[in-house]
């Protein structure tokens, strides 16, 4: 097979530099809406004599290497980082860190190095009968396009420059808009760095495919931090820490993702790369079953509220995601804790107003035992249901004759970082002021 010719090195380097400048400047021939199985090779190259000029990647036109470089540009949005005889592509790709193996993938390069100069083709389809469909140029020295099906094992290897996405299974990698993601529960989770994963081929995702993906992982999906090894279960799009496997019935498959994608979770409305995980669960229709207590909670307002019976939620049992009691007990933990993905709740008994209901006598608030401690407490006093402007302390001293015949109440609000703010109103004074 007559393929790319060897040229004097200096000439090829100069050509490559000019071609690179053309690509950067936008002069490179832009692929039309290319579809596999279509010979969309540019007319200015297709109709010129074979080897009469170089393409934008420094390859002779109407050769297999030029065709594959064009296909990678038009379909894979990948620009060839080198020019060489086809037989050398595998070694050069490996030297640059690209994967070369015997596993075919759509958009990969089928590569042969068994002849003097070898051959390359673009993989159009991977078939279930151990064959692949390829597109190629210049078979038999014709300088023409060809589409054919070959045995999967008939090649020297498959070069994975930037494969196209055909699978969105958990654990697979995809690339969109220049960023790499790992699929978990049908959603793409941002991969901040290859450091913990090894450079793995990522399937290129089209805009249409991207729009069809879930915004956050499916409830019940298990993920684990690559560095921390912490395991989480997705509830309402957020990662809820699983302190031990026993709480969820034993070990389950997990998708390993960067810890930064967990701690940096921003929510689907964010424009951040981290917007495919929520930091706190969202919605009001998520329910969890905490084990081993078997207590059911409804996720609402970023926290878990106990469900005494299903009648309180419409009378019909709802699907639940099993988590551990420890996740509930540790809700409200600091942001640095793996338990930080549920807001805590406080236990506030009804405040009681003490003191004598008379003018110039002080009325005070008795709070009882509030759990946990450490809350910031604020007070708002009301006279016959109307706010008493300026009265914000834990006591009030009525002095105006207009207070005679009125009843006082107070609303106490407790706030604390990582906890749901909660306000509780007192009962009214037992008697009207005298």
Image (cartoon, rainbow, N blue to C red):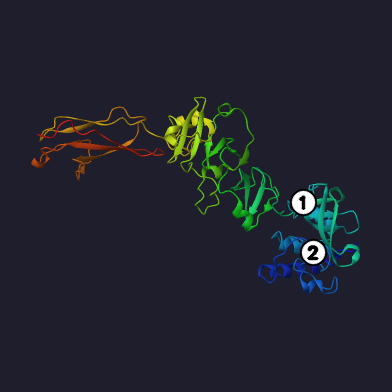
- Residue at which label 2 appears: 67
Q: Are marks 2 and 1 in contact (CB under 8 Å)?
A: no
User: Measured along the vertical axis of the image, is residue 60 above or below residue 78?
Assistant: below
Which quadrant would the C terminus be assigned to in this image? top left
Among numbered discs 2 and 1, the one appearing first in the sequence: 2
User: Observer-nearest residue: 58 or 280?
Assistant: 280
State left or right for residue 254 relative to residue 114: left
User: Measured along the vertical axis of the image, is residue 137 above or below residue 369?
Assistant: below
x 76%, y 62%: residue: 69
Name the residue furthest front: 315
The picture places residue 155, in percent across and down from the top left corner, at: 85, 51
Q: Nearer the viewer, mark 2 or mark 1?
A: 2
The picture places residue 49, in percent across and down from the top left corner, at: 85, 74
Helix, strand or loop at mark 1: helix
Is residue 306 visible to us here?
Answer: no
Helix, strand or loop at mark 2: helix
The picture places residue 310, in percent across and down from the top left corner, at: 46, 32
Is residue 200 visible to us here?
Answer: yes
x 82%, y 65%: residue: 9
Q: In which image quadrant can residue 207 be found?
A: bottom right
Labelled disc at residue 94: 1
Marks counted in the figure total 2
The picture places residue 213, in percent across and down from the top left corner, at: 60, 50
Crowd rating for badge 1 (residues with CA inside 10 Å; few <14, some 14–19, many 20+): some
Which quadrant would the N terminus be assigned to in this image? bottom right
State left or right for residue 278 relative to residue 78: left
Gap in angstroms between the C-alphas marked 2 and 1 = 21 Å
Crowd rating for badge 2 (residues with CA inside 10 Å; few <14, some 14–19, many 20+): many
Labelled disc at residue 207: none
């Amino acid at each position: 097979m007559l393929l790319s010719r060897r040229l004097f090195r200096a000439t090829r380097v100069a050509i490559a530099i000019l071609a690179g400048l053309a690509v950067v400047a936008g002069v490179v021939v832009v692929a039309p809406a290319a579809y596999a199985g279509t010979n969309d090779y540019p007319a200015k190259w297709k109709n010129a004599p074979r080897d009469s000029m170089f393409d934008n990647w420094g390859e002779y036109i109407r050769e297999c290497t030029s065709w594959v470089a064009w296909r990678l540009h038009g379909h894979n949005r990948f620009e060839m980082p080198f020019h060489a005889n086809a037989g050398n592509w595998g070694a050069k790709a490996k030297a640059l860190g690209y994967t070369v193996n015997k596993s075919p993938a759509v958009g990969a390069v089928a590569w042969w190095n068994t002849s003097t100069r070898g051959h390359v083709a673009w993989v159009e389809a991977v078939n279930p009968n151990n064959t692949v469909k390829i597109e190629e140029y210049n078979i038999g020295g014709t300088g023409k396009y060809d589409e054919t099906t070959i045995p999967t094992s008939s090649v020297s290897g498959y070069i994975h420059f930037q494969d196209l996405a055909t699978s969105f299974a958990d654990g697979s990698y995809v690339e969109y808009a220049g960023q790499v993601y790992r699929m978990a529960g049908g959603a793409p989770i941002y991969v901040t760095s290859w450091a913990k994963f090894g450079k793995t081929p990522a399937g290129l995702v089209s805009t249409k495919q991207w729009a069809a993906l879930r915004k956050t992982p499916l409830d019940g999906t298990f993920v684990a931090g690559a560095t921390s090894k912490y395991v989480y279960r997705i509830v309402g799009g957020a990662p809820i820490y699983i302190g031990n496997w026993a709480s969820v019935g034993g070990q389950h498959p997990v998708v390993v993702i960067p810890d930064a994608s967990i701690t940096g979770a921003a929510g689907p409305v964010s424009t951040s790369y981290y917007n495919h995980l929520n930091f706190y669960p969202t919605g009001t229709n998520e329910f969890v079953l905490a084990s081993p207590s078997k207590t059911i909670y409804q996720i609402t307002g970023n926290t878990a509220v106990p469900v005494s019976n299903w009648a309180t939620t419409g009378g019909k049992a709802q699907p639940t995601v099993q988590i551990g009691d420890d996740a509930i007990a540790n809700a409200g933990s600091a942001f640095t804790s793996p338990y930080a993905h549920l807001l805590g709740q406080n236990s506030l008994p009804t405040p009681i107003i003490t003191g004598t209901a008379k003018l110039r006598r002080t009325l005070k608030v008795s709070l009882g035992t509030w759990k946990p401690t450490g809350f910031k407490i604020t007070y708002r006093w009301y006279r016959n249901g109307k706010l008493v402007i300026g009265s914000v302390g834990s006591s009030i001293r009525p002095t105006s004759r207009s207070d005679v015949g009125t009843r006082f109440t107070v609303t106490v609000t407790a706030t604390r970082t990582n906890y749901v703010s909660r306000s509780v109103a007192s009962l009214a004074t037992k008697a009207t002021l005298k």
